[in-house]
Image: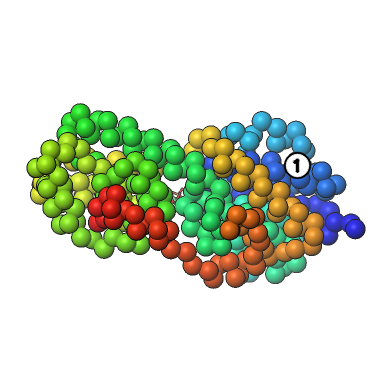
Amino acid sequence: MGSAVKTIGVLTSGGDAPGMNAAIRAVVRTAISNGLKVKGIRRGYAGLLEEDIYDMSSLDVSDIIQLGGTILYTARCLEFKELEYQTKGAEICRKHGIDGVVVIGGDGSFNGASRLSEQGINTIGVPGTIDLDIACTEYTIGFDTAINTAMEAIDRLRDTSESHERCSIVEVMGRTAGHIALWTGIASGAEYILTTEEYHGDIQRIITKIKDRHKLGKKNHIVVNAEGVGNSAEMAKVIELATGVETRATILGHIQRGGNPTCKDRVYASAMGAKAVELLCEGASNRVVGYTDGEFQDYDIQEALAMSKSLDPYLFHITKKLTTRG
Ligand code: ADP
Ligand code: F6P
């Protein structure tokens, strides 16, 4: 049986994530081994509209599995939310002979993929975001690297906080989702974990606990604060004033998005990239790859976007005993 597509495009879109290169490599190599041609589309939908498209060979993806970032670059392209530009994007695909596109990114990027699919181009999404905030999958490419980077940074902050007998407010990424805060907070033994989902501004509770523990002889205090909660500098001032414990705020920021992907990110990215191409070969479109219940699966993009995901309830539950929740 012949493949449903002959030439595929691959792009990365939205915030980058460590492991995106491993996914690109898997897409290119799987496609070539299935007899397909592959075209790289630089800078997401922006590059598609600008026809920044080039032929990719197996050699183009040599020695990239270990690299952070994305060799295809990434961008946010607001124009692509408009029908006119989606139609133009599909026309450009046809002009370049592209009949299937693998989109590596987050929910926003999958919306774009879905629109492209409506315009007659077969599309498959691959979940690439450090935030782990894609509901149809238990795993997103980049999360594992990001949490390990943040965890190591918090370990370092713990050292200096202990020497100076300080409190550290550490802000980790996650504008709307607290998964990074929850995981890094547990892994670094943080005293407090503040997430958008569960923190409702009760700073007095944190202050009281810091005072109590300080009296008991605790020398340092780590508060992991999610980006969505924010306000870390202000929080540090309030805590210092109320407790008398010198307090510093550190925003880890984009450091969490860089660096060599972990083994887990490389392997999952490889599997997800390969699966995306296999789906295109079977004639699938408007699907997103996910990892659920121990298996790589695929979902209709619209159904996937309609799903919701909360913080892991059991992980959240154990923080009650291991830490103090704000
Ligand atoms: P992520 O993919 O990480 O969620 P964004 O939400 O920034 O990141 O989306 C990335 C890009 O996907 C946007 O800049 C835009 O090009 C495209 N996109 C987002 N939402 C839509 C939409 N509703 N329709 C078409 N394209 C979209
Ligand atoms: O979605 C990934 C992410 O890193 C979020 O955690 C963060 O809020 C956002 O991207 C930052 O985006 P930008 O790179 O545009 O500052």
Question: Residue 292, position in %: x, y?
Answer: 58, 58
248 over 282 or under it: above or below: above
The response on whether ligand 1 sits within 8 Å of label 1 is no
Return the residue at label 1.
29
Query: What type is the residue that disc 1 sits on?
Result: Arg
Q: State the residue at coordinates (76%, 57%).
A: 280
Question: Residue 183, position in %: x, y?
Answer: 40, 48
Horizontal side of residue 98 vs 319, given as left or right: right
Query: Nearest the camera: 141 or 85?
Result: 141
Quadrant where the N terminus lies? bottom right
41 over 314 or under it: above or below: above
Question: Residue 269, position in %: x, y?
Answer: 62, 46
Q: Secondary structure at mark 1?
A: helix
Horizontal side of residue 169 vs 70, given as left or right: left
Q: State the residue at coordinates (9%, 42%).
A: 215
Which image quadrant for residue 290? Answer: bottom right
| Rendered image coloring scheme | rainbow
Horizontal side of residue 93 vs 293, given as left or right: right
Q: State the residue at coordinates (12%, 48%).
A: 212
- Could one spot residue 143 in this view of the protein? yes
Query: Nearest the camera: 100 or 141?
Result: 141
